[in-house]
Amino acid sequence: MAIFEGAGVALVTPFKENGEVNYEKLEEIVEEQIAGGTDSIIVCGTTGEASTMSHEEHLDVVGYVCKVTGKRIPVIAGTGSNCTETAIYLSKEAEKFGADGLLLVSPYYNKATQNGLIAHFTAIADAVKIPIILYNIPGRTGVTIAPQTIVTLCKNVPNIVGVKEASGNLTNIATMLAMADGCVDVYSGNDDQISDDLYSGNDDQIVPLLSLGGKGVVSVLSNVAPAQTHEICASYFRGDVKESARLQLEAIPLIGALFCEVNPIPVKAAMNLMGKKVGPLRLPLTEMEPANQERLKKAMEEYGIL
């Protein structure tokens, strides 16, 4: 059984103006997500700025979200690293804190071979008992987890169950699903830079991926529109593909604005525009360019969330 089906939110981490984690606000946005129908919470991923957290902060945030959520919906903790031992440590601690699953990014910078990736992910999986979703995001890591590698891991390692596909390569995804024979749970997660000033968002391929047999999306859009993102998936699963596609297309301008700069810069700006007060970004991320913020504001107004 899949860890979740539908729309999982790639949750932002709210910070105070002094840069500390704002736990009061974190609880508030978790409750808003659950009330909005979000199917799962993905904490300390790319959108959550985990790369700028200390290990202590990282695990404190995971534990806090698990506590607030209280098993009402699954919590999946991002615990990947380019150091296998670090990823094992974070994964074991997240499991102790009550995470229902793990999201493991491919090791960045090292540029491991496919055999290296298999060894890396297998070592982490052997150290924990909870299910694992791989995170294939070559635009950020510099390495692609090949379709055959994903299938091999899901077939041979019992608690590696799926992949968040952020390659944007639907051909590779279709090839993988054809090879998988049902053993790989696939979630849309596209977050790639197309050109110097254009990014492709993880929420613009939900319906295409569902049509190939995907389980859902790890969504940035859900931070600002949880009910709508959930309904894109729910409509599809009910068999109302036309309505699902309508909702997907209706959200495209907003999705484009949410990815007109690198994630999570725009989504934090959007939440602050909505009065959610999730605070600043941590360097090296900086605040949104004024022209892009105007584009974002206009898209939010047209979508009806501002």
Image (tube, rainbow, N blue to C red):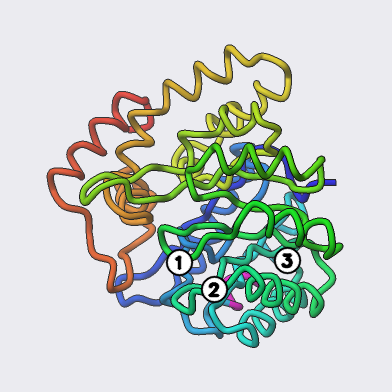
Q: Position of residue 298 (x, y in %)?
A: 23, 31
Mark 3, secondary structure of its residue: loop
Main SS of residues in magenta: helix
Residue under the point 83% across and 65% down: 157
Q: In the image, which is nearer the foreground, mark 1 or mark 3?
A: 1
Quick one: 13 or 193, which is closer to the camera?
193
Is residue 198 shown left or right of residue 69?
A: left
What number is the disc on residue 179?
none
Q: Which residue is mark 3?
A: 99
Mark 2, secondary structure of its residue: loop
Q: Position of residue 82 (x, y in %)?
A: 53, 79
Is residue 60 shown left or right of residue 25?
A: right
Rendered position, 210 above or below 73:
above
Highlighted magenta segment, given as a residue range: 59-63
Q: In the image, which is nearer the foreground, mark 3 or mark 2?
A: 2
Amino acid type indicated by mark 2: Pro
Q: If the image is split into quadrants, where does the C terminus sit?
A: top left
Q: CA distance from mark 1 to mark 3?
A: 24 Å
Q: Which residue is mark 1?
A: 141
Is residue 293 shown left or right of residue 230?
A: left
